[in-house]
Image (cartoon, rainbow, N blue to C red):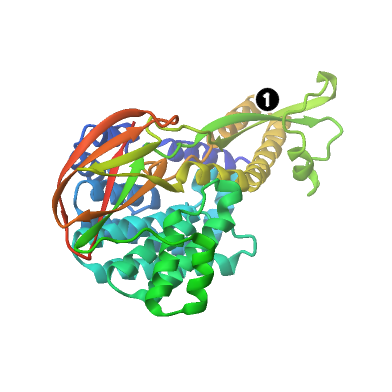
Amino acid sequence: MIKTLPFLLIISLMIGCAGYKFQEVIEPLETGKAENAYTYLQKHAPKEPDIPHQFELGLVAHYANHFAESSAALDIAGDIAEDRYTKSVSKELGSLVTSEKLRPYSATQYERLLSHYYSALNYIYLNQLDGALVECRRATALINYFKGEDEKYDFFGTGFLAHLSGMFFEAVGEWNDALISYKQAAEYYENAAEKTDVETPKDIGNALVRLTRKLGFTDEFERYREQYGEPPPRPENTGELILFYESGYVPSKGKEALMFPILKTDDVEDEKFVPTLMKREGRVYEEVKLEYLLRVAIPTIGSHRPRFNGIKVAVGENQESGVLVEDVETIAIETFKAQRPMILLRTLVRAVGKYLIFRQANKKNEALGLLTNLAGVLTEQADTRSWRTLPNQIFMVRMPLPTGTHTLNLSFLDANGQVRGSQSVPDIKIDANRITFLNHRTYE
C-alpha cells in the first residue's frame, strides 16, 4: 500500500499533461487557414505517434492540400490501431489500478473506416486512381474483418464506404467490382438503418439497374428495375459531378461524475460486488446505511448538430439537392452507448480497488488515508479521446453536367430546409463521360 501511493500520485501527473489544444486546431480551420492548423499539429506532436493526433493531423493535412502527408498520417493511425487489437497486458493491468486514459486507444470501427474515405480522396486529388482503389479494397477487407469478429456487428459506416467504393470502381470502368460494392452498400445501409436512420440512397438503386443492364445480367436487371425503377437518362457528351458535403463536427466526448453507494453490509472483496454496484447507479440510500460514496468519472456524449444540415448545388440551370449518406454523430453516439457498460465496469473495478487501498491506509493513519483517497480521485479521469475534427454529417450530390469548367453555387440549408448560407466554388472541370469527385467542408 505504501508503495502504491507514490505510484498513484505520479500517474495523476502523467495523465494530467496536456498535448495539443483542440481550439488551436479548429480556429484556423474555421477561418480558412488549414495550413496554420497543420503546422500547429506538427509542432505539438507527441514523442511517440498516437492515434488521436495522427487522425487529426491526417484530416487537417487533407484540408491543407497536403494529400500525400495526409494519407501517411492516416496510415500510421491505422497501423497503430491494428497493433492495439492485440492488447498490452502491462498497460491493461495498469489501467485497472489507475485510469482509463492509460488504456491504449485503439480507435472506433467507424473512425478507422472513415480514414479510408479521406485517404481515397487524397489519391483522387493526386490523380492516382489506383491508390484510391487500393483504399477501397482496404476498407472492404476491414469491413469483412469486423463482420468476422462480431456476430452482432452494427455495420456503422460500412454502407457509406461500400457506396464510395462502388462510385470509384465505376469511375475507372471496373463494372463488376462496382456492382459488387453497390450491392454491399444496399445491404449495409439496410443493416444499420434501424439505429442510424439513414435511408439507402436512391443513387444505389439507380447504379444497380444501370450496371446490371451494362453487364447483361438480365434477371438481376429486371429484378432491380422493378424494385428501384428506371434511373434517369444520362445525356450524351456530359460528365458527372459527385460532391461530398461535410458539415459541422462530430460531438466531442465530455465527462460526468457518478456516485455509487457502498453500504455497511457490503462484502467489497467479493468478486460479484462490482456487478451489484453497477445496478446502484442513480439510486439513493439512507445515510445510516452508507459506508462510503464511491466517486467515478466516465465519458459522456450528446447531440451537437451544426447549423447547416443540408445542401443544394446549382450550376447554371442544373440544380441538385444533397442526400445524407453518413450520419457520423448518430454513429458516434450509438457506438458509445454500446461501449458504456464495459467502460463503467472497468471504471468500477479500478475504483473499488482504490477504495480497498484507501480503507487499509485509513485504518493505520487517517492522514495517510486522506492522502490515498485524494490520489485515487486525482487518477480517476474519464477517457474522452476521439477523432474530434470529423464532420457531423456527410451529404452527397451526384449530378450530370456539360463538359467544361463550371462554378458551383452551394446553398447550405438548416434543419427545416431553409437556405442559411451560400458559397461559390469556381473552376471545377467536368470531362465527357468521366466522374469528377470533390469534397467540401463547412464548420457552422
> Residue 119, image x and y in percent?
30, 59
Check disc 1 and give the amino acid type: Glu
The image position of residue 201, as x and y in percent, is 46, 53
Residue at (75% x, 43% y) in the render: 274
* Residue 174 picture quarter: bottom left
On the image, the x and y values in percent for residue 149 come to 58, 67
Q: Residue at x 18, y 61 (%)?
A: 126
State the residue in front, 282 or 313: 313
Residue 141: quarter of image:
bottom left
Q: Nearer the viewer, residue 257 or 251?
A: 251
Residue designated by label 1: 366
* Residue 47 rendering spot, x and y as whole percentages: 31, 50
| Residue at image location 51% in from the left, 74% down from the top | 220
Out of 309 and 117, give the one closest to the viewer. Answer: 309
Is residue 43 rendered to the left or right of residue 444?
left
244 left or right, relative to 279 = left
Number of residues whose C-alpha sits closer than 10 Å to that of mark 1, classed few (under 14), some (14–19) or many (20 or more): few
Give the image quarter of residue 299. top right
**Direction top: furthest residue:** 287
Residue 45 in view, yes or no = no
